[in-house]
Amino acid sequence: MTQATAPSEKENRQGSGPSLRRSVGLTAVAALVATSAILIAYAEIRGASLAHRHSETSISLQTDLINTMLDLRHERLAALARQLAVDPEVDSVLVANVASSEMDEALQIVREAQPERPTIFLVSSGGQAIASADNGSVSLGPNTFTRLRPQTPYTDLLIDEVGSPVQAHSTPVRRGNLVVGTIWTVLPVSEGIDEFFPKLSGLAYRGTDGEVRSLLGAVPETGVGNLAGGGDLRARSMVLSVGEGRRLEATIVPLQYGATEAAGDLILLRDISDALRREELLTMMALTAVLAIILLSLGLLLQKLRVGFRPLGAVVRLLGAMSGGETKMRISGIGPDRPGMDGKRGTASGAVVRSGREIDTLLLAVDSFRSSLDARNELIAVTEQLENARRIQQSLLPATFNLHPGLDIHGRMRPALEVAGDFFDIFTLDDGRVALLIADVSGKGMAPALFAAQASALLRAQCHQFDEPAKVMQAANNALCERNPEDMFITAILAIVTPDTGEVNFVNAGHCPPMIAKQDGTVSLVTTAPDMVIGVLADLEWAAHRVVLAPGEQMLLYSDGLDEAQKEDGTLLGTEGAVEMFRDACATHGRRSSRLLCERMLDRIDAFAAGARQADDISILVVHRKSEDEREVRAPTPDPE
């Protein structure tokens, strides 16, 4: 068995909190019991729901069957009465109003020919029965015929003298317009009902007075007599306990035919004692099986937890002892053919380790976790360094743009990554002119950013050594070629502006052509013959170019991150799109301030990209030569947006 051995005094250093194995075991047990309880409750609820649904369906079917039976029998009783009403012999007896044994025998023959064997009465116009065919199952009093003397065919549910429900149909016998008597056909409701409900153990009738009368079979008074009162037109079912372990299912169906009020309730009784005992037995067996499965699962779970946590406990004790300075503690039982934790072979004196693989896996996981923490710390350190580099690079950009009252200058640089290869600079020369510099180092990231810082310092320094931009570019190029181990290159524009005249002398080292927005709203590109980039070959020369900014005009210097801005689908803004964007921005915001113009240009770039990731560094530098009227304005007009 895997275990950790250590001096007894080290054992006192172990924690006194609850055992992890015990906590996990209790949690798993609670989860298993809760899940089992939920499943059992769900099964019970679903079973009750299905039983209720089955009961409602059964009640509905029985009600429909009884109503169908009543309708069918009423039709047969009416057909028999109509048949007798047109018989001449019946007419003669009713006209004579004399009882005749021959007529009784004739009616008996007609009755025996019917499948239900109904009772037949010939009733005179005065309400006296003068002939009948009956076996004694129906007892209608004389007052029934006297009280009910319909002039048209009549069908209803009646209660005979003993309180049992019967189906009765009366058809008048006419001679011309004169009613000479009526034919009554009567059938007890209980007659032949076992053909429709063959498994009934009893049939009872409860009248409107609440008294229950037995119609068929044995109807125990216990339970049945305690049913709720009548008058309810809703069929229902309930289980009655009648003693000696017997239980009956009572289905109560209102008896109603054509009237809104029921003539009473028909109670159908079925003995369900055996079925309930079988259901209870099956339920007990199912619960026993579920309980056995739960107990078996708990036993297996606890056994697996005990075995599974054994090597973990050994490793925990080992690590605790090692943290306390114990160097002799080891996992006991390293086999003679397996190396121990110190790389040595075990001795035969120890027990064989049966869970070393789990311990090795745990140690490897700990080591992997430590490595991931180291990598995370290194990533955090690199991220902090990049953030510091970003702040330093931003601090190298011009802090103030107010270099001359006749010029409104502003610039923005937004890197694609933490640091950028773009840079720009503005500064005043000794003779009062203003130098504008914008450049783009090949590539993105830390190396181009460092090279950009070096190039920016060299170009600024050379501007104070030479008066002409071409010579400044040549001197800076030679210096950069000597210190370019990564073979990077730079595209750049160096422009020197004379504020009083608006003259701009510049050189373009492979950079994007400047844009000039005139006061009439047109924008033009200042295209020149292509010149070489700097930082590649020494002793090169660059051509000087000259433009003049009229009062009120703006010039835009920018990096290729502007015209190469793109959407998610790869659509580029392009040079024409950049010119149009600058024209719209100047028309809307250009006369207010260069700062506002720069901000709106960046906003329009974001709107064009529509959430697409910025692919390259973006730098823009705007110089606006103020007119005389604009020089009198001390502060830019606020943006209404």
Image: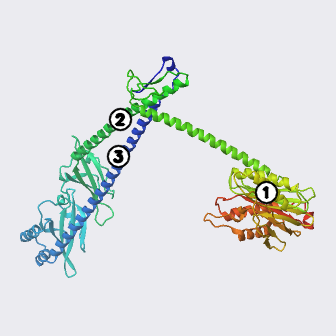
Disc 2 from disc 3: Cα separation? 27 Å
Q: Which mark, residue 477?
A: 1
Q: In this view, does 454 lie above or below 173?
A: above
**Residue kind at label 2, given as amino acid type:** Leu
Q: Earlier in the sequence, mark 1 or mark 3?
A: 3
Question: Disc 3 designates what residue?
Answer: 44
- Residue 300: assigned label: 2
Tell me the quarter of the picture where residue 337 sits: top left
**Neighbours of disc 1 within 10 Å: few (<14), some (14-19), many (20+):** many
Instruction: Single out the mark in the foreground, 2 or 3.
Output: 2
Quarter of the image that includes the C terminus? bottom right
Q: How far apart are marks 1 and 3 (CA)?
A: 89 Å
Of labels 1 and 2, earlier in sequence is 2
The residue depicted at 81 percent of the width and 69 percent of the height is: 516
296 on left or right of 132: right
Q: Quadrant of residue 593?
A: bottom right
Q: Residue at x 66, y 44 (%)?
A: 382
Gap between marks 1 and 2 measured at Cα: 80 Å
Q: In what element is the residue under mark 2?
A: helix
Q: Residues within 10 Å of mark 3 (few under 14, many from 20)?
A: few
Tell me where residue 434 sits by quadrant: bottom right
